[in-house]
Image (cartoon, helix red, strand yellow):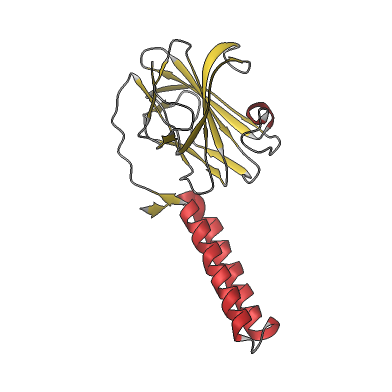
Amino acid sequence: MTIHKEGYQILFWTVLILLAVNILSTSYLFNGNETAITLVLAASLVLFLLILQFFRKPRRSTPLNDQHVISPCDGTVVVIEEVNEPEYFKEPRRQVSIFMSPLNVHINFHPVTGTVQYVKYYPGKYLVAWHPKSSTENERTSVVIRAKNGAEILLRQIAGALARRIVWYAKEGQQVQQGHELGFIKFGSRVDLFLPLDADVKVKIGEKTKGGVTVIADI
């Protein structure tokens, strides 16, 4: 277990701010009040540990399989349905959505091995991740990968009420490998997959997923 590179700057500033708060509480705000000073210190430690665990980077081993679409993130399956995907495919697709709680690992992984066909970032709102319109109105990034068998998978990173930055590493024309890092959602919150209609979905609503490991579907 290590710390993800996206957390370095936030953790650095968190330490500086918490250190300043504790110096002020000890020297000025609560000078001589040991109970208040202890409470501030305890709250600071809890806050730091919460942020630290958010940026944890576990070691994962992905069993490569060109027929599998593996989970792009840790979380809970909240949507499995047929929808009309209007951005790229402009036709019906099978949507599988995974909600990421603040306690989940927030690294995103490539679901298949293939070639990146399309990357598009959209600024937007910060509706709660389970809101029906979050997929089309929130800040989001769409990435389409063409798998080795020709099937195209659209992955959409979606910010939520707490998320304020989406990070993605994919570029159009890039060759990517299943299970490698696609990006990161800082303090956020949902990933949508749009699969071919004939994809054999292997997960169910409410099922917990492990990014880079759980098989979402066969294509």
Q: Residue at x 42, y 14 (%)?
A: 199
Q: Residue at x 41, y 28 (%)?
A: 111
How many numbered badges does the structure rendering display?
Answer: 0
Q: Position of residue 7 (x, y in %)?
A: 50, 53
Nearest the eye: 17 or 119: 17
Q: Position of residue 28 (x, y in %)?
A: 69, 84
Tell me which corner region of the image, top left, top right, bottom left or bottom right, holds residue 215.
top left
Q: Is residue 131 above or below residue 165?
A: above
Q: Position of residue 185 (x, y in %)?
A: 54, 42
Q: Is residue 158 above or below residue 7?
A: above
Quadrant location, the C terminus = top left
Q: Residue at x 62, y 36 (%)?
A: 129
Of all residues shown, which one is farthest toward the bottom? 32
Nearest the eye: 8 or 196: 196
Q: Is residue 15 above or below residue 82?
A: below
Q: Position of residue 116 (x, y in %)?
A: 47, 23
Q: Residue at x 46, y 16 (%)?
A: 152
